[in-house]
Amino acid sequence: MSWFNLWDGLKTKTCRYLLQRYLGQFFENNLNLEQLKVDLYNGKAVVENISLKVKALNDLFEDQGWAFEVISGHIGCLTAMTSDTLSKWNNYVRIDVVIR
């Protein structure tokens, strides 16, 4: 195993931990490493195939006073990029979300 692979694994596991820690209350299942692709050098992270906890989302919306009710939710692909990447490529955060 090279140091490069070890470093990539550490970055991915750290990002998974942070996502699970702060957003895990909205995920139906824990994230696994196959769902997460992290390229911090280029300022890009991708999360795929996440089922959402409907009750947690509805509780959040109700607490915020928003008139939304989620029946079911799934994130197909969420791509996040840093502001430096966005200015270089004139791009946005891309989200493929189905909420019914």
Image: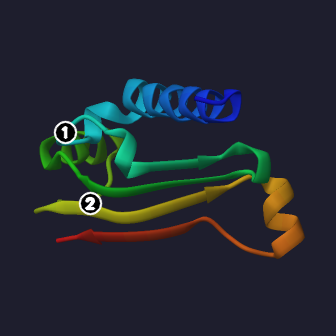
Report which residue position mark 2 lands on: 67
Which residue is at 77% across, 53% downward? 42
> How many discs appear?
2
Q: Nearer the viewer, residue 6 or 18?
A: 6
Residue 29, by quadrant, is: top left
Q: Is residue 1 left or right of residue 86?
A: left
The reply to whether residue 21 is in sight is: yes
Q: Quadrant where the N terminus lies?
A: top right
**Amino acid at dot 2:** Ala
- Mark 2 element type: loop
82 vs 79: above or below: above
72 vs 92: above or below: above
Report which residue position mark 1 lands on: 29
Most extreme residue toward the bottom is: 90
- Percent of width and height locating residue 46: 51, 56
Residue 100, by quadrant, is: bottom left
The reply to whether residue 68 is in sight is: no
Q: Nearer the viewer, residue 16 or 56?
A: 16
Determine contact: label 2, label 1, CB under 8 Å. no
- Percent of width and height locating residue 41: 78, 46
Rendered image: mark on residue 43: none
